[in-house]
Image (cartoon, helix red, strand yellow):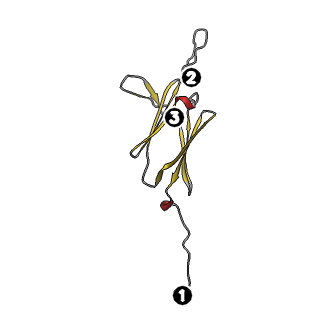
Amino acid sequence: MEETKDLQGMKKYPAPCDILQNKESVVLHLEMPGVTKETLDINIDNDLLIIDGKKEKVHFKGNYLLNEIRHGDFHQEYTIDNTIDRNNINAVIKNGVVTLTLGVKESEKPRKIKVLTKE
């Protein structure tokens, strides 16, 4: 997993993500285990969708022989284009997966063209 560092030297990890598209929306599913609603922050800044989450370190008793469980900050950014309705974005967190649904603007949705006959 790629890691980046912010200005304070703290590690930030990208969240694994699946992105799907349908006629009505673009849906992102991000794996953010240990992140809660209270430690999740989602913002839009111009054309940038910014997702931050924090997973607190769990302290176990004993001496570690292996320490692979990640903790710290998750950070992900996506550029969104003008087809996305910025007033129609919803987020749900369940079982460590954050699901973001970005609605597509009405003018961008596929529509059926009615064919007429001319006599």
Label 1: how many Cα within 10 Å (few below 14, some 14–19, many 20+): few
- Is residue 112 positioned above or below 101 on the image? below
Work out whether mark 2 precedes mark 3 in sequence or the reverse, and give the earlier one. 3
Q: Name the residue under label 1.
A: 118
Question: Which one is in front in this view, the residue at disc 3 or the one at disc 1?
Answer: 1
Look at discs 1 and 2 and give the one toward the viewer.
Answer: 1
Identity, as a three-letter code, of the amino acid under mark 1: Lys
Marks 2 and 3 sit apart, C-alpha to C-alpha, by 14 Å
Q: In terms of depth relative to the viewer, which is nearer, 16 or 109?
A: 109
Between the C-alphas of marks 1 and 2, the distance is: 69 Å
First reached walking from the N terminus: tag 3 or tag 1:
3
How far, Cα to Cα, is label 3 from label 1?
56 Å
Name the spot of residue 23 as percent of width and height, x first: 56, 58
Q: Which mark is residue 69?
A: 2
* Residue 109, percent from left and from top: 52, 61
First-in-chain label (1 vs 2): 2
**Residue that carries the numbered disc 3 in the rendered image:** 15
Label 2 Cα neighbours within 10 Å, binned few <14 / some 14-19 / many ≥20: few
User: Label 3 crowding class (10 Å Cα cut-off): few <14, some 14-19, many 20+?
Assistant: many
Q: Are marks 2 and 3 in contact (CB under 8 Å)?
A: no
The amino acid beneath tag 2 is: Ile
Image point (51%, 55%), residue name: 104
Tell me which corner region of the image, top left, top right, bottom left or bottom right, holds residue 34: top right
Identify which residue is drawn at 48% across, 62% down: 107
Residue at the front extreme, as displayed: 87
Q: Where is residue 47 in the image (x, y as percent from the top left)?
A: 40, 46
